[in-house]
Amino acid sequence: LWFSTALVVALAVAALTSAAEEPRAAADGKLDAAALTALIDREIERRWQADGAAAAPRADDAEFLRRVTLDIVGKIPSVTEVRAFLDDRSPEKRRRLVEELLDRGAFATHFANTWRDIILPGANTNLETRALAPPFDAWLRIRFSVDTPYDRLVTELLTPAAMNEADPNPFVRRASVPSPLAFYQVNERKPENLAANAARIFLGTQVQCAQCHDHPFTHWKRNEFWAFAAFFGGAALPADAANEAGGEKAVEAPAAVAGLSIKVPESDMVVEAKFLDGTPSAWKPGDDARLELARWITRRDNPYFARATVNRIWEHFFGRGLVDPADDLDARNPPSHPQLFAELARQFVEHGYDFKYLIRAITASRAYQLTSRTDSNASSNGDSADDPQLFARMSLRRMTPEQLYDSLVEATGFRDNTPRQQAAVFGVETARAAFQAKFADQSARRGEAQTSILQALALMNGSLVGDATSLDRSERLAGVAAMDDFLDARQRIEALFLATLNRSPELAEAELFGAHLEQAGPEGERAALADVFWALLNSAEFIMNH
Amino acid sequence: MLHRPQLSRRDFVRLSSAGVIAGSMSGWFETLAARAETAKDRSRACILLWMSGGPSQLDTFDLKPGHPNGGTFQEIETCVPGLKISQHLPGLATQADKLAIVRSMTTKEGDHSRGTYLMRNGNLPQGPIRWPTLGSLVSKELGNPAAEIPNFVSIAPYRFFAPAAFSAGFLGSEYDPLLVGDGAAAGGEDDNDQYALKVADLAAPSGVTRPKVDQRLGLLGSLNDRFIGGHSTANAIAHRIAYERAVKLMHSDSGSAFNIDDEPSAVRDAYGRNRFGQGCLLARRLVERGVPFVEVTLSGVDGNNALGWDTHIDNFESVRKLSGALDAAWSTLMIELAERGLLETTTIVWMGEFGRTPKINPSGGRDHFPQAWSTVLAGGGIRGGQAIGHTSADGEEVEDRPVPVADFLATIGCALGIDREAQNISNIGRPLKVIDPEATPIAEALA
């Protein structure tokens, strides 16, 4: 086996794979999406039984529609979509909905947002990253919109064509030239940053601690880190180009020395480029070292690449990876479902690194279609049913800043009139950028974000919700209120529920809000509708993906 | 029947310190929150005076008179024999017995964004760990989770180049600072708006009256009760708590802490009628009300509010003006804290992202210089009346007792009485100590 040269790595790999006796049904090769769904169900249910966990009931149609729409196209469904889906009597409607969502342009946008967050963390908050993000976003959107296989996407990202051109000023670089170059730019083209982040993002492996010393938690040694970083050696620019004028860099970038090797900083050691499994590269002078690296990362038999990717997609749909945290695939941090994990990765490779194949299989699974309600388990089995790694209930995730903004736009009909070209210019922010900066959260997982006081104030009193609930300015409100002739008060309240929470009000809610409208009388009814809309937009149910 | 919330250990830790004391929660939760609260020493506070742009050490606290690098400023005697500082800091000179001047800071980052992150978050912004800023870490340790005013207030921040340096990072946005007077970026001061030291969106939109707000909150409450009753998870509960705290701030007396107009005119004058001066006054009002971490940014005077200390051009005139604002505000702040008996429990920190080149450039300016520069500690937990370390006669090198970032931040942590074992779970799932375990606090700076 190719990875047997490094004993420690072999051990780590063994821990990831040994438990994974391939299920018999899959032994002959490819499973179609439906068969993969069946395998997911089998493995997840096996763990429920082993742990004595009672799974939550199936989500109803409204809950499923909202969740899957947020997960695939990044915003809540429209009123029309909600009504159409709820009225659809076809038993196949959930599967058909997923197909329809995957065909939308918004799928590419949402997955571009999601992967940009992973690859360029801080694009919502860091000025430089934000300035570099538009061409990167555009590139990702194109790649996702034409279903570029993920191995090709990563290869292209690691070997951008513009690599050897002079670095253009990031502030004048336009989004009209899609390019993945930002990955190199935000990492300052430093081999150590590139190596650490490439390993973390594409291999789910934390090697960066080994940059300065042998890794305290895992087996990575300092020399192994620098041998891996050597593949990025030629990416370093002269020290002045990347820096702000006047800013002196006290730390010198490690110099790339002759051949494919690198000098370990603060030592006299020069190490040859080696992959993380210890194998040397077949690089010859004249070859592109980064292409060598990309080929190794995306090899079919690289034990980390497919797993790391599958794990991120699983996390995207469940709020938690099969390995958690998602970028820490390590023998010390085993997957919750080893066989399922191995098989998902294997099928992902067999299906040409196709995201949509995995998405079809995952969204059709029983686990994905469970309710998120905590008060509805068949039996409240205490801790075991609540253990998030059992996936016995859908997790509750707070929307990402993008999801929240786009959902507010969907619910309220808001239009941002700031010219897009001004987005990256100093001092001028689109409503979207300002909103996303305010709602960015740096905490651990996507969806684990918690609302801050300033965010609450912005939603309660800020201009976006303020305008949406203003009698003069809100299109949505005007639209609903104008339907006097053919909607009664109860129906108008329902329309606002459908626009925000994507469900009809329950009886008690209909009564409460109906009473509020009634109390206001005919003259006050529009103002009372504004109150209802305000409360819905500020509710925990609205801001959560559940 | 109420179900136990679906919480991971991480959620549990986070919620307990987020002040989950909502009435609908079950008993074990309240006990936990109460325990978390009693374990904290709430008598300590920290005020960070953040000098955006990188202040010149040679023209403030480490002058080089007689050397060509020294420039035009004179040294003056302070109330501590032998300890001298700039002639433009006369108010501080009378209180030098409270100052520990660190003249031997040495770091390796000369870029504004990265230097800002380094000094405020303790690490360089690379790798996957999203380090929390100092105020988030400290306020999480010292704060009362159920306090009406948020435990971390950042006044007049200039965040443009390094927003993550003003973020709670992996601690999550519940530990983010409450920003006051944010967003007044490169523009001038708005004299009509009391130096714009306001919490954004604190007031309901015009036309939405208080009874209307209460009605709306009533409707919202019933929606949330229903949803959270069926989804008792940490983030749903945290959402409700954030709203409860935001509403408290909108409606209770605690919000009046931000009304600096209530102060006598003479007091406001003493702090200086500028953003930084009024910001320091606000800081005193907040510390009086138990806020454990307040930072005030001095990023410019004369309507300029961007990297004011970044004096590449015309260093001396700029630093003279900045020193005037700094001296009035800081010295008044210490006097007022002392009068209230609060100075001995309030640690004051003065720092920027780096220092400036000893050599004066052809534009009469000084450039970025992280190798040898100054910071100052004062007040609670600090032994004042001394300079720590010293630089060479030309100011180019630290000659004695180099102080790296980690040691400096650890000194602040120790002055505030933070447990060296205190730790948080990071975003990569591993515990990280609040105070870097490899750092050595500056022992002689501690009281």
Image (cartoon, grey):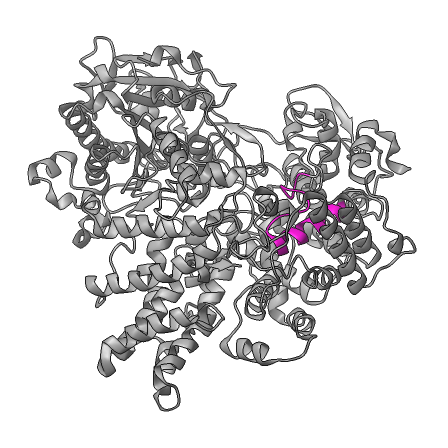
- The image shows residue B346 at horizontal and vertical percentages of 26, 25
Quarter of the figure with residue B70: top left
- Which of the two residues, A531 or A156, is positioned nearer the viewer here? A531
- The image shows residue B167 at horizontal and vertical percentages of 43, 42
- The image shows residue A344 at horizontal and vertical percentages of 77, 52
- Which of the two residues, A225 or A70, is positioned nearer the viewer here? A70
Quarter of the figure with residue A480: bottom left
Residue drawn at (35%, 65%), measured in percent from left and top?
A535
- The image shows residue A335 at horizontal and vertical percentages of 71, 41
Residue drawn at (53%, 37%), measured in percent from left and top?
B9
- Which of the two residues, A177 or A143, is positioned nearer the viewer here? A143
- The answer to whether one can see residue A26 in this image is yes
Report if residue A313 lies within the magenta region. yes
- Circle count: 0
The C terminus of chain B - image quarter: top left
Report if residue A3 lies within the magenta region. no
Q: Is residue A321 above or below residue A546?
A: above
- Which of the two residues, B130 or B216, is positioned nearer the viewer here? B216
Residue extending furthest toward the bottom: A485
Q: Is residue A387 above or below residue B67?
A: below
Q: Is residue A364 above or below residue B429?
A: below
Residue drawn at (64%, 57%), measured in percent from left and top?
A179
Quarter of the figure with residue B66: top left
- The answer to whether one can see residue B306 in this image is no
Q: Is residue A127 left or right of residue B96?
A: right
Q: Is residue B73 above or below residue B112?
A: above
The magenta span reads A305-328
